[in-house]
Amino acid sequence: MTAATKELTANEKEMEVITARGSQRAEDSAAYDLARFLQNNLRSHKVDYHSNLLYRIVVDGHGKSDPSPNKYLTPARGHNAFQADIVIRNQKNHVPLVAIELKLRAFSTHDVLTYSSKAIRHKEIYPYLRYGFVVLGGMPITNKFFVHNVGFDFAFAIQDSQRGRAELLTCLRKQIRYAKRLISITHGEDRNAVRKYETSIHVS
């Protein structure tokens, strides 16, 4: 490999890094804007941007948990917690109800494998949590999502428009209701005996 070729290869790698950083900034900005929209329309709930959720609780040899109970709802990233793009929480006690992972314009098989596996880890701690995958302003939900998904409860591909956001908002309101119903059942607060549970698939 000549010196000129090596220099070209190094420049290409640098451009790839710059492009990736630019894409990540655009995605972060889109997630922030969507979180603000959701907060303005879900005023009885708390909508967090880049919010941390636990994926593990460890009890040590002295009977103490890591993190400690007072950190269960406010864990630090890197301390048994992963970050989700958007989390919708109960306004009063900050319990997470719905989490969203967002991709801008396109998504890969790796994205589905990574984020849906992450969803399962979070739902082991918060069993009522509804977890969704949102593709904003681009490709539809293609077959690779259905082949590789293991943890997402719903997926939405929308244009970043008033109509697209309204459709997503309708879906999220349903997911919030589902999460609250699961909480009431698991806590024994639902006085109606559960005699049927099934997962329905709505594709459009």
Image (tube, rainbow, N blue to C red):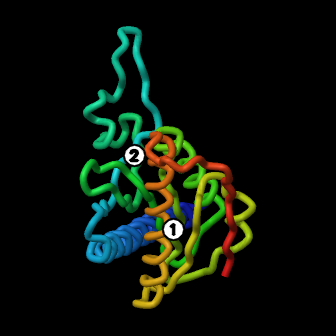
Which amino acid type is marked by label 1? Glu
Q: Identify the element where label 1 is drawn.
A: helix
Res. 7 in view:
no
Q: Identify the element where label 2 is drawn.
A: strand
Res. 128 in view:
yes
Left/right of residue 73 with respect to residue 130 in the rendered view: left
For the point 31% across and 76% down, the residue is 41
Per the image, the residue denoted by label 1 is 12
Residue 53 bears which disc, if any? 2
Quarter of the picture containing the N terminus is bottom right
- Residue 22 locus on image (x, y percent): 39, 71
Left/right of residue 80 with respect to residue 1 in the rendered view: left
Q: Is residue 52 above or below residue 157?
A: above
For the point 58% across and 65% down, the residue is 154
Quarter of the picture containing the C terminus is bottom right
- Residue 75 locus on image (x, y percent): 31, 40
